[in-house]
């Protein structure tokens, strides 16, 4: 007659604690990602219902009065096409995207200057650079 042990070993693995850990990490990264602001220059962007997101290769900021930035670097209006062309060449993509972040109070003529600069760069290089006007979602 063999003696049976009361304590049986289970070969099952409980993944409940692992899923709790994954959800906690997910919540942590969701909260911290909303705290990071992508804007290097503080602007009051116009509002829109559109929620289209695009890859941002080069960002142009326009602030009132006539303050132009490529990334965080301030530039003069007469250097806009040259500096923008240099930044787009750095990206080494034929169809790079330029994101235009213009303050609400910026004159439409300043936005047209950026559009004309991109069109001139496209004509000179034969590339197809795109322009996207960045907005904030309506609340």
Image (cartoon, rainbow, N blue to C red):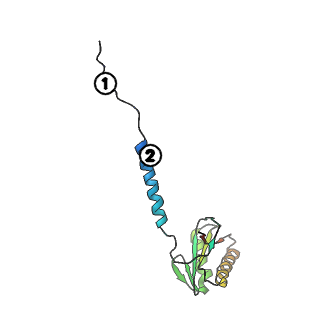
Q: Is residue 73 above or below residue 23?
A: below
Residue 13 place in picture, x, y as percent:
41, 36
Instruction: Find out whether the residues at labels 2 and 1 contact each other: C-beta distance under 8 Å.
Output: no
The residue lying at 31 percent from left, 27 percent from top is: 7
**Relative to residue 1, is residue 133 drawn left or right?**
right
| Residue 45 figure quarter | bottom right
Query: Split into 4 quadrants, where in the image is the N terminus?
Result: top left
Q: Position of residue 107 (x, y in %)?
A: 64, 84
**Residue position for label 2:** 19
In terms of secondary structure, where does tag 2 sit? helix
Q: Residue furthest front?
A: 139
Identify the residue at image location x=48%, y=59%. Answer: 30
Question: Compared with residue 93, is residue 13 higher up or lower down, i.e. above or below?
Answer: above
- Classify 10 Å Cα crowding around label 1: few (below 14), some (14-19), many (20 and above): few
- Where on the picture, by quarter, is residue 48? bottom right
Location of mark 1 (residue): 6
- Going 67% across and 84% down the picture, which residue do you hit? 109
Front residue of 43/49: it is 49
Horizontal side of residue 127 vs 65, given as left or right: right
């Amino acid at each position: 007659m063999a003696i049976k042990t009361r304590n049986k070993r289970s070969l099952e693995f409980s993944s409940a604690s692992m899923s709790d850990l994954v959800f906690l990490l997910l919540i942590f990264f969701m909260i911290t990602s909303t705290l990071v602001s992508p804007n290097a220059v503080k602007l009051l962007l116009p509002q829109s219902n559109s929620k289209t997101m695009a890859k941002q290769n080069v960002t142009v900021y326009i602030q009132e009065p006539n303050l132009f930035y490529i990334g965080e670097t301030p530039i003069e209006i007469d250097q806009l096409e040259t500096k923008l062309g240099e930044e787009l060449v750095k990206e080494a993509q034929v169809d790079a995207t330029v994101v235009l972040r213009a303050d609400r109070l910026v004159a439409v003529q300043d936005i047209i200057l950026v559009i004309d600069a991109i069109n001139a760069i496209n004509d000179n290089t034969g590339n197809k650079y795109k322009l996207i006007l960045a907005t904030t979602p309506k609340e």
